[in-house]
Image (cartoon, helix red, strand yellow):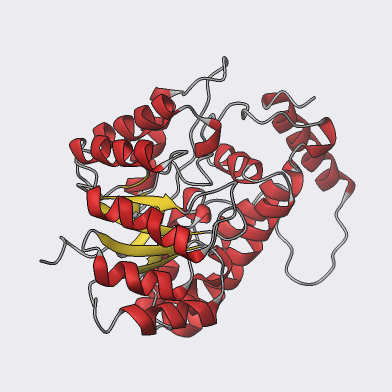
Amino acid sequence: MQSETKLRGIFTPNLVPYDSRGEINEPELRRYIDWLIEKGVHGLYPNGSTGEFTRFTPEERKRIVAIIADQTRGRVPILAGAAEANVRETIKACEYYHELGIRAVAIVAPFYYKLSPASVYAYFKEIGDNTPIDVTLYNIPMFASPIDVPTIQRLSEECEKIVAIKDSSGDLPNMIRMIQAVRPNRPEFSFLTGWDAALMPLMLIGADGGTNASSGVVPELTRKLYDLTTSGQLDEARRVQYDLLTLFDTMIYSAEFPEGFRAAVELRGFNMGQGRQPITSEQKTDIVTLSRTLQCMLSEHGFTNEPIGGCATGVSEDLSASDVSQIVQHVVAELNRRKLL
């Protein structure tokens, strides 16, 4: 028997706001979820890497998903991260999320210990045979044991409850290999990319969508890119992909991951609070670059006004003393608001 509706589209790996005590800011999280849905994301993805799942307790992870499920009220499907430290606790998480009515869970391969392909297969086979909820394999080789193509193919053939894979390697040829190996026997099996920098090309080779951190900041742009690509408007899609890459690189390289994304969400009007990972003063996000890049991108696509001083046009132009003064005042006010000065 095939599972319910195939996972496709943009599933946002949503961040979690903190309050002044470093605890989950539930009202702000609920407001953020409503905003993402209103902006057109296809689904939500709590407890992923962008959502800092390792920095929460198991009880907090369950609470995050419960809050999001309650606020979403079935408006969009939820793909919840369910990876715990061992297979027994992971299956318990699967059971809990099934009770909440979650559409599917995403489970990263075992981390910390580097396991052989046989051990990775055994881990997911145990879950696939005992889960009441559909499972998405989560391949992120930079942080966890990789899930190779033969293992994916075998699991897809043996476990009906394993219905998708999220691949965050950004490896286009490997995505082709996965699709070639699985899709002939499991046409309803979903392939999602977690690599924003290659969302369009990965969709063009057969991916069904993505779980992209940028969609938590600019859901309008990621939805636009998805729609343009699926409708064959490739010249326009390519332009949006280039813009999305610029933003993605700025957020990735301006701070420790995912602090750049947290800062960008703040610039869209949400109080994200101080993250749980301590950082030095030298690691503070470059608010000036991040703010201007985000605002210029959004203004170019008609989502907001240009920042003070305008946006670069590709030609070097000197700013007037008045422009510089305005920019400095704006930046200082922003830094003071975020208590970075």
Locate residue 100, reporting x and y percent: 21, 36
| Left/right of residue 167 with respect to residue 252 in the rendered view | left
Residue positioned 50% across, 50% down in the render: 110
Q: Residue at x 46, y 64 (%)?
A: 118
Q: Is residue 164 above or below residue 182?
A: above
In the foreground, 109 or 59: 109
Q: Is residue 137 above or below residue 44?
A: below
Residue 296 locus on image (x, y percent) = 63, 57
- Residue 78 x/y as whole percent: 30, 47
Is residue 189 visible in the rendered structure shown here?
Answer: no
Q: Quadrant of residue 340?
A: top right
Residue appearing at x 89%, y 46% in the figure: 321
Q: Which quarter shows the N terminus?
A: bottom left
Q: Nearer the viewer, residue 126 or 321?
A: 126
Residue at figure coordinates x 75%, y 32% from the top left = 279
Residue 327 in the figure: left or right of residue 117: right
Q: Quadrant of residue 136?
A: bottom left
Residue furthest to the left in view is 1
| Number of callouts | 0
Instruction: Give residue 254's position: percent from left, percent from top.
Output: 74, 49
Residue projecting furthest to the top: 21
Q: Answer left or right for 279 relative to 98.
A: right
- Which image quarter is the C terminus in? top right
- Relative to 93, is 6 above or below? below
Is there any visible trace of residue 327 in the rendered image?
yes
